[in-house]
Image: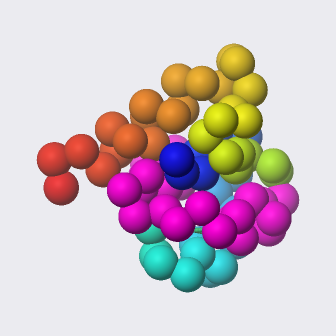
Amino acid sequence: MAFVITSPCIGEKAAECVQVCPVDCIEEGKDMYYIDPEICIDCGACEAVCPVEAIYPEEEVPGEEEKYIQLNRDFFQGR
Ligand code: SF4
């Protein structure tokens, strides 16, 4: 399980999450930020500070945002 960043981050990129993540697993992509699910420790700090409510625990991602579970994972593939 991990936390997942979804579409409200696109074009927003507020980056408060990056400041609070204790394990530095949030990285900047072209349009949005992404969480590395292999490193995330599920602390929830990022979710609490996101001003656009883009971050969810994986099992609570809304249906229309579910593709972001894979998109976050894909961003870190092959690194
Ligand atoms: Fe980082 Fe915690 Fe958010 Fe995971 S839940 S991305 S460890 S701040």
Tell me which residue sits at (18%, 55%) in the image: 79
Tell me which residue sits at (51%, 34%) in the image: 69
How many numbered tags mark residues here? Answer: 0
38 in the magenta segment:
yes
Q: Quadrant of residue 45?
A: bottom right
Colouring: rainbow
List x then y, in percent, for residue 62. Answer: 74, 26
Residues shaded magenta: 26-51
List x then y, in percent, for residue 59. Answer: 65, 35
Q: Nearer the viewer, residue 11 or 6?
A: 6
Q: Is residue 59 toward the left or the right of residue 72 in the image?
A: right
Report whether residue 36 is seen.
yes
Q: Residue furthest left?
A: 78
Q: Quadrant of ligand 1?
A: bottom right
Q: Residue furthest top?
A: 64
Report whether residue 10 is seen.
no
From this view, report whether residue 66 is shown above or below residue 6: above
From this view, report whether residue 14 is shown above or below residue 32: below
47 in the magenta segment:
yes
List x then y, in percent, for residue 55. Answer: 70, 49
Q: Quadrant of residue 65?
A: top right
Tell me which residue sits at (43%, 34%) in the image: 71
Q: Nearer the viewer, residue 41 or 54?
A: 41
Tell me which residue sits at (45%, 42%) in the image: 72
From this view, report whether residue 42 is shown above or below residue 16: above
